[in-house]
Image (tube, coloured by chain):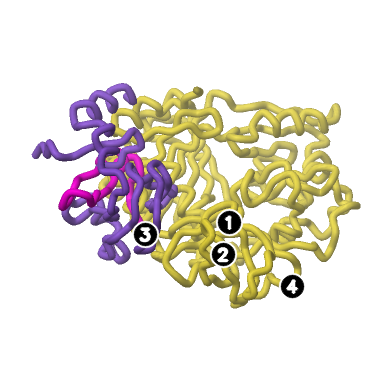
Chain colours: A yellow, B purple
Amino acid sequence: MKTTPLHAAHKSLSAKMGEFAGYDMPLYYADGVMKEHEWVRAQAGLFDVSHMGQVILRGADVVTFLERITPSSFGTLPAGRAKYTVMTNEKGGIVDDLIVTRLEDDEFFAVINAGCKDKDLAWMRSHVSAGVSLQTLDDRALLALQGPEAERVLREVFRIDTAAMPYMWLDEARLPDGTTVYVSRVGYTGEDGFELSVPSDKAVAVWEALTAHQAVRPIGLAARDSLRLDMGYCLYGHDIDDTTTPLEAGLRWVMGKDNRGFIGAEVITDPPARHRVGVRLLDKGVAREGAALLGEEGAPIGKLTSGGYSPSLKESIGQGYVASGFDVPGLSIKVDVRGRHIPAQIVPLPFIPAHTKSMKKQAA
Amino acid sequence: MVDTLLKFTSEHEWLKIEGGDVAVIGITEYAQDALGDLVYVELPEIGRKVDKGQDVAVVESVKTAAEVYSPVAGEVIAVNDNLSGNPELIKKSLEEGWIAKIRMTNPAEVAGLMDRAAYDAYLKTKE
C-alpha cells in the first residue's frame, strides 16, 4: 500500500489504520469516531489528506480546457478564488468532483480525489491541447484543519492571519521558517477551516506544530466521512459516479450559464429522471449504502448511496436517489434494512447548517 | 478475571452456559475494539430459532454493521433489552453486555468451541 509523509505520525498516535484508495490511512485515533466528529464541530480537527491529488494546469488555452472538461465557467474567476466542480464524460456522467482554484490568468490549482487520481489524470491528459500543460505536485502534502477554532489556531501556531480571507479563497502564506504554503479556506466538513498544501518534507513539522495546540486533535477518515454526511456532500464512487449527471446529483449550481460546450452537454436530460435526496430514519437502526428506499406501500422508489449514524444529530442519515416525483421534502418513505422496513423521511440537504464563512459578498 | 467457563468462536462471540441448556452469548473485546463506538444493536425476536453459525443479531457502529453469529443451534428465549437504549453496555461486562440467551437443541455443541487459551492463541494469528 502507498503511504503519505505522515504515516509514521499516525502509527505513533496508535491510529487504527485501514486501506483507502490504495493508501494506508488513519481511520480513527484513540478517541474514536464519535469524539473526533464532535471535536471538529466544537474545536479544530487536523486531517491528513495527502493521498488526494494536487495538480497545476497552465497554458494559454487552460480556460477553454477547463470549460470543456467541466460544466463550470472559469473565464472571469478572480485569482485566488476556488470553485467546486465536476468533470463530465460523454454520457454526461461524472468522472470526479474536484476543487479548482485560479492562481494566475493562465494557471489553476486542482485537488482531485485519491481514488480517482490515475483515472482523472489520464482523462485530463486525453483532453489537453497544445496550449495546456498539466503538472502533478508529487512532492506536496495536504492537511485539512477544520473547526471553529481553525482560524485562531493558524494565527497562534504559524502567525498566519486569515481574518480577511473569505470561504473558497486561496492565498500563499509563509510558515515561520519561510516555507511557502498554499492556504485555502475550503473543506469537507461544513465547519470553517483550511486546507494547507505544504512541501512533503515539511509535512511532519506542520502536523506536529498544529497538533501541539490544545484546540487541535488528529481526525481520521471515518469522521471525515460522518462529517461530510451531515452536510450532504457527495462522496465520489458512492453518491456520484460515471452514471450520475450533475442534474441528477443536484449539482445544477456548478454549471456555468454560459458553458454549453462541455463534454456530455448535449445528452444530459433536463429535468432529470432521478434525484439525489437526503433521507433520515424516524426509528432506531442504521441505514447504509445499498439499502432500498420504498414508498409507503412498500414499492421500490430508489436506493441509498451513502448512509450511517450521525454523531451530531444522533440519528441515522443518508443520501440516495429516488425517481422523479418522490424527491419531495417531508415525504414519508421506508428504508429496507435487512428485511426490516424502517419508517423514514425525505429531507433537503444539508442535515445541519454549514458554518463556513459566507461568500455572498464575493463576486463570482 | 479469567472465567474458565467461557467459550469462544472464530467470529469473536463468547458463550457461557446458564442452567444446563441455556447459552448466554455476546461479542468479545476483540470485536468490540474492531467496531469502535457502538450506536445500535438489532436484537432477535424471542422465539426465533437459529442454526449453529446463523446470524442472530447485528451490532452497528458508526461505520459498519457487524453480524453476531449464534455459536449453537437453538431458540432465543431472552434478549438484553438494555442494549436498545445503550448499545455501549456491550463493552461493560459479561453480566451487562450479553446480547441473547439461547435454549440449546444440542448442548454437546459447546464442547467443540474454543476455550480461552485456544481463543487467545487464535487472536495471535490475527496480528
- Label ID, residue A335: 2
Nearer mark to the viewer, of 2 and 3: 3
Residue A279: x %, y % from top left: 56, 66
Tags 3 and 4 on a common chain: no
Task: Look at 61% across and 53% down and name the residue there.
Answer: A305
Name the subunit of mark 3.
B
Task: Look at 78% across and 32% down and name the residue there.
Answer: A59
- What amino acid is found at the position of numbered circle 3 in the picture? Leu
Q: Is mark 3 on a helix, strand or loop?
A: loop
Task: Look at 91% across and 52% down and name the residue there.
Answer: A266
Gap between marks 2 and 4, in whole Å? 17 Å
Q: Residues within 10 Å of mark 1 (few under 14, many from 20)?
A: some
Q: Earlier in the sequence, mark 2 or mark 4?
A: 4
Tags 4 and 1 on a common chain: yes
Name the subunit of mark 4.
A
Name the subunit of mark 2.
A
Q: Give, as a single range, the part of the protein colored magenta.
A: B15-43
Residue A134: x %, y % from top left: 72, 28
Gap between marks 4 and 1, in whole Å? 20 Å
